[in-house]
Image (spheres, grey):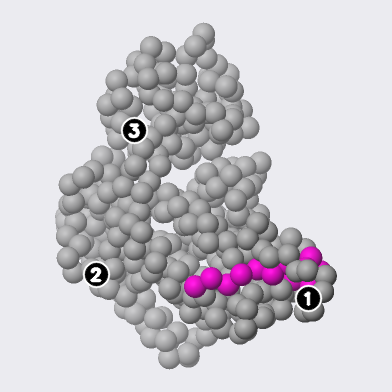
Amino acid sequence: MNWSDLYWQRITPLHVILWPLSLVLIAIIALKQLLYRRNILRSVRLPIPVIIVDSITVGDSGKTSLIIWLINSLKLYGLHPGIISQGFSENYGPPLPVTTSSKLSEVGSKSLLLAYQSKGACPIWIGYDRTKVAQALLAAHPECNVLICDDALLDFRLHRDVEIVVVDNSKHNFGNGLVLPAGPLRDSLSRLNKVDGIVMNEKSSKLVIDTKNHVRTFHMKPESECFVNLLDPDKRSTTAAFKDKPIHVITDFSHAQSFLEQVRYLKLNVKSHTYLDNFQFPKEQLQTQGDEIILMREEDAVKYLKSASEQFWVIHEEIAIDIGLREVILKKLREKFMDPKLLDILVCPLCKGPLVYKKSEQELICKADRLAYPIRDGIPVMLEEEARELPAEEEV
């Protein structure tokens, strides 16, 4: 546990002094919610559904894993998601696209990690003003028909259709139970009763946080883990293949203890180094000898994407999430997709041209490519392999 975690877990005279500021923050958040709910302040409504994925405490809590799962789930249903995020706190510039070739100093490690893990499955844009970022992404990628926002639970300017909060199943997660700056909470815990789903990131089989009061609670568990080559992500290996090789572990200071415990549990031949947050080893210090392996967390490895060699590996965890979460999200999306205004702005993923809604057949027709995309259970399936080719004699 690092010093910041220790600070969140206790109540000291300093916390008592800061507590009135926490009450002020709670009041400000409640006032903003009221103003947006009464339409005194206007939120920006995008033409496509928006899914918010966030945590109620400081830190990631497993959001990245959930977002990757969400991308894959939406694509299975023929949807074309896009991701927006603020990137990092110093990013005050115009909206930027993020790819694995982006500069770490410009986009931040979390955005780069999303690009690395999503493998180009969907566009990712970042910027300080989320509404402008969303509009820029849609202008560049009109085929996107659902938007995932990494954070923004408290940014009420952006209208949302689904809110998902990730909670780390740890006795330390809610800390001392106070709101910033006296505690780790970004809003009061009563906010959990207003979201569409709470995802418990269960790193152990023993539940620490009581979920009985939250009926929309779903569980996210590690299903399997493997080693992935940083230079070639399609190259994977098992623990057994690394048993007799010397392992050089690199991790940041704040995650050193948990990551080293994970590696040692696998009974690997480890010698370790740790470094402070935001520090990057020079390339010459990362030269390996013989069959030595450099092992990192995925979150740290993105800092070395451009200097990686074949000896760089990461531990990748596959997760499993209750299927009920997918149904909750799809139900919300169906309500949005059957809005005629949304059907009018959907475009063909191939030619980016307009579509015609054929209500009787529940199809979206592309005249240019003569393809008919099916609408199943209220969800447009925008996949070429699922589209029906229109015969020459069929009129549109």
Q: Which quadrant holds residue 307?
A: top right
Please name the residue that numbered disc 3 is placed on.
Answer: 259
| Amino acid on which the number 3 mark rests in the picture | Phe
Residues in magenta, as a range: 366-377
Residue 395, image x, y percentages: 79, 79
Residue 145, image x, y percentages: 60, 68
State yes or no: discs 3 and 2 in contact (Cβ < 8 Å).
Answer: no
Disc 1 vs disc 2: which is toward the camera? 1
Q: Secondary structure at mark 1?
A: loop
Q: Does residue 155 appear anywhere in the picture?
A: no
Q: Is residue 44 left or right of residue 203?
A: right
Residue 314, disc: none
| Amino acid on which the number 1 mark rests in the picture | Glu
Q: Residue at x 29, y 40 (%)?
A: 2
Q: Nearer the viewer, residue 329 or 183?
A: 329
Q: Residues within 10 Å of mark 2 (few under 14, many from 20)?
A: few
Q: Residue at x 58, y 72 (%)?
A: 375
Q: Separation of disc 1 and disc 2 at Cα?
A: 49 Å
Q: Separation of disc 1 and disc 3 at Cα?
A: 60 Å
